[in-house]
Amino acid sequence: MTPFKIRELKRTDTEALLAFEAQNREWFESHIDPRDPAFYSLQGVADHIDGYLSGFAVGTWHPLVIEDCNARIVGRANLKNIHSPLDSAEVGYRIGRQACGKGLATMALRHLIQEAAQRWKLTQLVAYVYAENVGSRKVLERCGFVAEAVSAGEKAECRFVLSMPSH
Ligand SMILES: CC(C)(COP(=O)(O)OP(=O)(O)OC[C@H]1O[C@@H](n2cnc3c(N)ncnc32)[C@H](O)[C@@H]1OP(=O)(O)O)[C@@H](O)C(=O)NCCC(=O)NCCS
């Protein structure tokens, strides 16, 4: 059995989330856009959680964390912009450097796909990935996403789409 579990983000996650994000800041910034420096404080993370939970309450976001057997946060995965456009949402995920290579992003994305279909009744998920992010592209392709378009420019970005049957 996997020693990791996926659960919804909670208001009481402030300290654990700050520790996770601060420890992995450099790692994340080498793959995805940097956060506002103001994020990296207890108040900054508390505001961030408030924003995500407000989005969850109105059904536009579904924020999840992955924790290890010691209740340490080792990853995050979110559905964003749910129902915008209708029946669609964007996926996002990040795994701490030490926890990479264990299949956690794949597990988290499969969980998001299930929530998207069963809870939110969505029929399409999209993801935006920098073309050079080979690990993330592999995770998306393994979960059935198909690369649709690559933006031009210095940092080429790829749009991936997953079409899901409607029930
Ligand atoms: C991309 C990321 C989410 C992958 O997380 P993970 O938990 O290691 O992913 P998984 O273990 O489920 O699968 C990753 C796969 O990519 C492979 N991989 C990772 N980096 C690779 C690279 N540079 N070249 C080739 N393959 C690579 C791994 O070997 C693994 O494949 P395998 O299971 O066949 O061995 C993680 O590295 C991360 O959070 N990066 C920083 C933030 C980020 O990029 N988020 C995604 C934004 S779209």
Image (cartoon, rainbow, N blue to C red):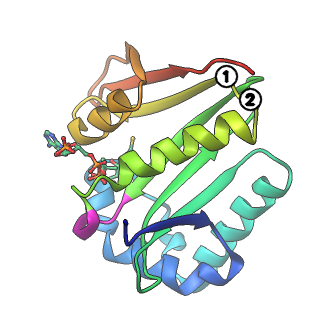
How far across and down, in percent of the image, does residue 51 sit?
Answer: 72, 62
Quarter of image, res 91: top right
Q: Residues within 10 Å of mark 2 (few under 14, many from 20)?
A: few
Q: Main secondary structure of the magenta part?
A: helix
How far across and down, in percent of the image, does residue 66 sit?
Answer: 47, 66
* Residue 28 vs residue 141, the one in the foreground: 141
Quarter of image, res 117: top right
Please tell me the numbered disc located at residue 123: 1
Q: Residues within 10 Å of mark 1 (few under 14, many from 20)?
A: some
On screen, residue 31 above or below 100: above
Q: Secondary structure at mark 1?
A: loop
- Of badges 2 and 1, the one in the foreground is 1
What stretch of residues is rendered in magenta? 95-99
Location of mark 2 (residue) = 84
How far across and down, in percent of the image, does residue 95 sit?
Answer: 36, 59
- State which quarter of the image contains the C terminus: top right
On screen, residue 58 above or below 123: below
Q: How many marks?
A: 2
Magenta span has 141?
A: no
- Which numbered disc, 2 or 1, marks the residue that appears first in the sequence? 2
On screen, residue 139 above or below 98: above
